[in-house]
Each structure stands twice: as C-alpha cells, then as structure tokens.
Image (spheres, helix red, strand yellow):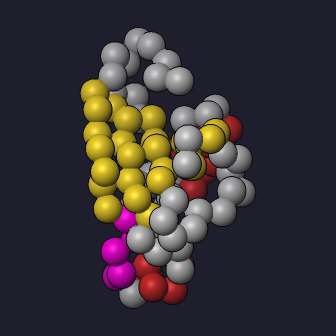
Amino acid sequence: MKLSRLVKRRTVAQEMADVGAIRINGKVCKPASEVKEGDTVEIAYPRKILAVKVLTGDETAIKRKAEAYIAESEREIDPDTKPW
C-alpha cells in the first residue's frame, strides 16, 4: 500500500488492515497479505471506498515508477457508518 501511495505510511496501512478496512479480492486481509498482479484491492477511507486493479506487485518496478495499479471504482460513503 505504501509503495503505491494508496496509503501514506506503512503504520497506517497496517492499522487499516487490522481493522478490516482493506480487502483483497473481496476478502478481509491481514497486514502481511501478499498482493499479486491481477488482484482487486478495496480500501475504505473515512469518506470513500476505492477499488483498484493491481498491475504489478514488483517493488523494484514500482520504485522505478512503473504503474502499480489502475482505479476501477470509487464511491462515497457516510463517514459515520462502517462500510463493511
């Protein structure tokens, strides 16, 4: 999450995974879950849910500015409710 810039800090990404705010292919993931090319990742932010398709999971390629993902959908949510 951090390398792709979907979440700014690793600790925040870990906390989001711990509370179930990140799903991989529709399943709640753990902080150490591996993301592979072709996976769909959904991230619940306080005001929206963003779904992205993973283009590469290669850290070296991402560091060399390869596109890590493509946005599939984004939907607004009520910040007072849990989306999942």
Whether residue 59 is visible to the viewer of this picture, yes or no, is yes
- Whether residue 61 sits left or right of residue 18 in the image: it is left
Q: Residue at x 45, y 85 (%)?
A: 61
Q: Position of residue 41 (x, y in %)?
A: 48, 51
Q: Position of residue 12 (x, y in %)?
A: 55, 46
Q: Position of residue 62 (x, y in %)?
A: 43, 79
Q: Residue at x 40, y 59 (%)?
A: 53
Q: Residue at x 64, y 32 (%)?
A: 19
- Whether residue 63 sits left or right of residue 35 in the image: it is left
Q: Residue at x 53, y 24 (%)?
A: 84
Foreground: 77 or 72? 72
- Whether residue 10 sits left or right of residue 49 in the image: it is right
Relative vertical location of residue 84 with respect to residue 48 in this rendering, above or below: above
Q: Position of residue 64 (x, y in %)?
A: 39, 87
Instruction: Please check the rendered image and state whether residue 27 is part of the magenta-colored stretch, yes or no.
Output: no
Q: What span is colored magenta in the figure?
A: 65-69
